[in-house]
Image: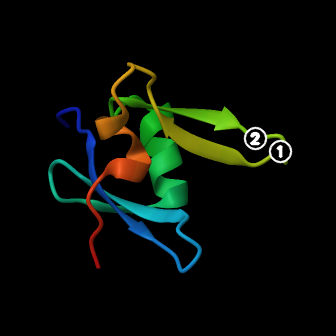
Amino acid sequence: MDKEIFSAVRKNGDGDIESFRTSSGRELTYEEAISEVNNGNVLGANVFKGKDGEMYIRGNADGDPTNNLDALPTYE
């Protein structure tokens, strides 16, 4: 499988990301996306444990806010 990046996100009513679309068009739930990032299949993001003990995905810090996960296009 070729390495992918996240190309779009779906957000819930609170504005939180709940799923991702990859550069190859795959749609991943948040949990699937965590696994794909951890396995090295999706580049440009990392997984971290929040203060609440839950696992979260964030874009790799590169100083460019336009490619932050929250700034990605949304899809329905």
Against 48, is 13 above or below?
Answer: below
Query: Which label belongs to residue 50?
Result: 2
Quadrant in the picture for residue 27: bottom left
Against 65, is 7 above or below?
Answer: below
Q: Indicate left or right for 66 with 38 as reference.
A: left
Secondary structure at numbered mark 1:
loop
Is there a contact, CB below 8 Å, between mark 1 and mark 2? yes
Which residue is found at the position 33% from the left and 26% from the top? 64
Give percent across and percent down for residue 69. Answer: 40, 46
For the residue marked with disc 1, what is the amino acid? Answer: Gly
Secondary structure at numbered mark 2:
loop
Give percent across and percent down for residue 18. Answer: 50, 66
Against 15, is 46 above or below?
Answer: above
Which colour scheme appears in the figure?
rainbow
Which residue is found at the position 50% from the left and 44% from the top? 35
- Mark 2 packing: few (<14 Cα in 10 Å), some, or many (20+)? few
